[in-house]
Every structure is written in structure tokens, then in C-alpha cells.
Amino acid sequence: MPYLEDDTMRLIVITNETIFEEDGALLNKLFAEGMHTLHIRKPFATEAEVESLLYRIDQRFHKQIVIHDYFNLLNTFSLKGVHLNRRNSFRPNIANISVSRSCHSFQCIETSMNNHNYMFISPIFDSISKAGYNHAFTKEQLLDVKSKHLINEKVMALGGINIKTIPLAFQYGFGGVAVLGSLWENYLQNRNETALLQRFNDLQTVTEKQ
């Protein structure tokens, strides 16, 4: 199950967990700026709210969207796929979709490698969005599992990802990174769209240089 079409490090965006009025329009702008893959993670949203958000995202971007909840929405929308987690741990019986999952250990990565398109592992660095959610692995541990090929192009680093830590994730061998806190920061407080788009472009630029 390959994920990467080339050797470029990937930047995956995870949504802010809150539903807000301009959510869909802002995600359309991120796609227009070059967002490759979007994970819709809205753990407190209803199915109707997630469905409404998908309708507000331009249909041409749907094949770049992975959902974390309400997998039956793939019967309505032509999406990229689903992401398995503690809330939703079983793959839906839908053919030709991407299936990814969250891991918190390299044992999980090892058992998931052959039957998932890619995996998140976290926290690699101290989390930006979750206070007290600190890195779970030492530099030595990460370099060790890299040497055993348990960090490769199918493994995405999550937790504390920003423009300073992306080059480190590349050195550890990750095929990509997933961003949350460093992108959304205090957007819901200041609604500074220009600053958010600039943060995305900065993250994208650093990722593409690796």
C-alpha cells in the first residue's frame, strides 16, 4: 500500500477540532495554497455538522480528504479515505480507499505496516495543542527504529510539528508530518486568516525542502 508518489516529504493538515462558521471557506483556501491531504478530525461534531462541512468544501478537493468519524459519509462523498483511531477502530467495507491509523508505539507501527496506507505516530515532539503531552521517544530510540526501517515513507510524525522540528523529523526518516497546533494556533481567538495562510506556506516550504 504505497502512499508517496515520490521521495518528497509530505505535509498533512489536521483540522481544528471545533466547527466554526468560515471553516469550509478557509479549508478551500488552504487547498488552493497547495494543501495535499486534509484529515477532518472533529471529535465533538455531529454527523450532520461534518456532512455540512464537506458540502462547503469544493468537490474537486474531496479526493484529498480523510475523515476520522462517520465513515458512512463515504457513501455520499468521494473522499480519499478513513483514519482509524480509538473512537473508530474498524475499517469500513468500502473498496479503493486509503486507510490510515493512529499509533503510539512502534509495535503498533510494525503490525500496521502491511495493511495500512500510512500511520501517524505521536507524540514525537512536545505537543503544541495539548498541554503536558510531551515527546514519547528519545532521539536514540528514534534513530534505532529508523535503522530497523520501522520509520519510513509510510510513517508520519505527529506532535510538536513546526518549522523547527520538521527537519528533525526528516532526519529520523519519517515520510511526512501531520500538523495541528502550529497551524491553527490561536486562530479561533483572532480570526487572522492571513497569518494562518502564511503559517501554512511556511510549513509547506520547510517540508518541501527536506
Image (cartoon, grey):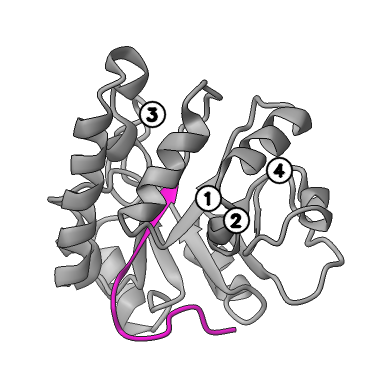
Residue 102 placement, left or right of 81: left
Instruction: Look at mark 2 in the image and give the residue it sits on.
Output: 66
According to the picture, the residue beneath numbered tag 1 turns out to be 39
Image label count:
4
Residue range of the region highlighted in magenta in the rendering: 1-14
Crowdedness near tag 3: few (<14), some (14–19) or many (≥20) residues, C-alpha within 10 Å: few
Q: Nearer the viewer, mark 3 or mark 2?
A: 2
Image position, residue 76 (x, y; %):
80, 53
- Spatial CA span between label 1 and label 2: 5 Å
Which comes sooner in the sequence, label 3 or label 2? 2
* Residue 101 visible in the snapshot: yes
Question: Which element carries disc 1, helix, strand or loop?
Answer: strand
Describe the element under mark 2 as helix, strand or loop. strand
Residue 8 drawn in magenta:
yes
Nearer the observer, 166 or 209: 209
Mark 4 vs 1, N-terminal side: 1
Q: Residue at x 21, y 51 (%)?
A: 201
Residue 142 highlighted magenta (yes or no): no
Tell us which disc is closer to us: 4 or 3: 4
Q: Secondary structure at mark 3?
A: loop
Residue 55: image quadrant is top right
Question: What is the x, y in percent for residue 171?
Answer: 19, 71
Prevailing SS of the magenta stretch? loop
Compared with 153, 177 (above or below) is: above
Q: Position of residue 143 (x, y in %)?
A: 25, 72
Circle 2: residue type: Val
For this orientation, the residue located farthest to the right is: 93
* N-terminal label among 1 and 2: 1
Q: Are marks 3 and 2 in contact (CB under 8 Å)?
A: no
- Judging depth in this view, the residue of 116 and 17 nearest the camera is 17
- Give the alpha-carbon distance from disc 3 to disc 1, as whole Å: 18 Å
Q: Left or right: 66 with respect to 10?
A: right
